[in-house]
Amino acid sequence: MHLQSDPIHYAIVCLESGSARLYAELIQTAEHRAVLWVRPLALHINQADESDQASSAALGLEMGYIYDLRDGADLILPLKLFRPALDTEVIPVLSYISHPDYDHQTERSLLQLRQFVDQIYHASPESFRRSNISNKN
């Protein structure tokens, strides 16, 4: 399920790659270029060590680590990579990063976002080619 039709109605979108999911707020859709302008909220990587398992399980999350990206930069990425995010997957993630005991590691979070975007690019370079995101006349 991708955001090919009328994506403006989805306030939060998800981009998945392997065991990682990027949740982002949809700012604007540039349909003529087939891209989305998004504001990253959180990156959930489903690879947990033992210290993360208890806190993730307490919130009903899959095992993994969640990075708070709310202080990061906006992104413009191909529309076809995104899908609408489900409330049932987003609410626990946002609750987790909003908890007072959450360790906000901004530099580490931004590094993880950079690595995730690199991973997306290398996994799907055709999505980033100019012919796929240029004006459709």
Image: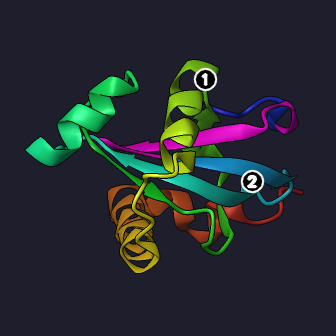
Q: Mark yes or no: residue 49 visible.
A: no
- Majority secondary structure of magenta residues: strand
Pick the residue in front: 50 or 20.
Answer: 50
Say if the magenta span includes residue 111.
Answer: no
Q: Amino acid at mark 1?
A: Leu
Q: Amino acid at mark 2?
A: Ala
Is the residue 99 above or below the residue 113 in the image? Answer: above
Q: Which mark is residue 86?
A: 1
Q: Which mark is residue 34?
A: 2
Q: Which mark is residue 16?
A: none
| In this rendering, position of residue 87 left or right of residue 92 | right
- Residue 131's quadrant in the figure? bottom right
Secondary structure of residue under mark 2: loop
Which stretch is magenta? Answer: 8-22
Q: Residue furthest bottom?
A: 107
Q: Position of residue 93 (x, y in %)?
A: 50, 38
